[in-house]
Image (cartoon, rainbow, N blue to C red):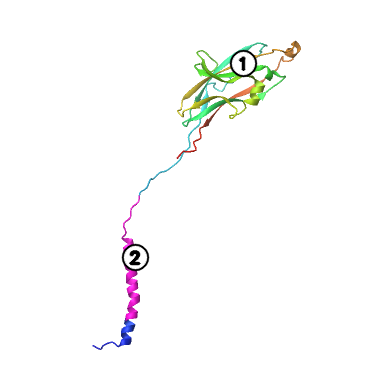
Amino acid sequence: MKTPSARTRKIAMFGAAPLAILIAGGMVWQGSQAAFTASTRNAGSAWSTGNVVLTDDDLGAAAFTVENIVPGQAGQKCIVVTSQSNVPGEVRAYTQNLISAKGLEDRIFFDLEQGTGGSFNDCTGFTPTANNVPELPLSTLASVNRDFATGGAPWDTAGNPGETQSYRGTWRFDTTGMSQSEVNALQGARVGIDLVWELQSDQSPTAP
């Protein structure tokens, strides 16, 4: 066999270098495919909102519908408010939509008590526990007790559907200090107002 010249040996050596690099690269690629791996998964993360529901036992009727009242007359009604909320919150009472005429709104005084017992239109067995909406004329209530922020008679709910709270509203027609002509001027007058109970859920700034 003929012995390769020195030039031939050099060509052979340089020619083999690229092949050696390719083989080495292939070995690294093969090694990366054989690495050990492991993972863990916490599947199904989701968020859903709670329900805030408030009802009462008035069956769609007005809490107070009183006709032909005269000076000095008074009356009361009870109502039971139920929270069907599944998140904790706070209920407050306030007034809206005052309809006034002839100044009667300044002469009908109203207060709202919290308590136990009683039902719509029947205060039998009602026992007061708090009076956070003191007696005021309807005109004043409409001004100072007009939304949730200014509402009274707060009731904290725990977020258990079916929680109830009883309320008793008392009104009176007061003409103290009025002249006879001023009293007579109120004949035929009518005043109306909405009593609102609103539930807002608690806010938790540290909820996960």
Of pointers 1 and 2, the one earlier in the residue sequence? 2
Chief SS of the magenta region: helix
The amino acid pointed to by label 1 is Trp
Q: Position of residue 122 (x, y in %)?
A: 53, 14
Query: In the rendered view, does 105 fall on the left or right side of 28?
Result: right
Q: Residue at x 66, y 24 (%)?
A: 98
Q: Is mark 2 on a helix, strand or loop?
A: helix
Indicate left or right for 97 with 54 as reference.
Answer: right
The stretch in magenta equals 13-39
Say what amino acid the circle numbered 2 marks.
Answer: Trp
Image quadrant in which the N terminus is located: bottom left
Q: Residue 171 carries which label?
A: 1
Q: Which mark is residue 84?
A: none
Q: Which image quadrant for residue 185?
A: top right
Q: Is residue 52 above or below residue 17?
A: above
What residue is pinned by disc 2? 29
- Give the quadrant of the C terminus: top left
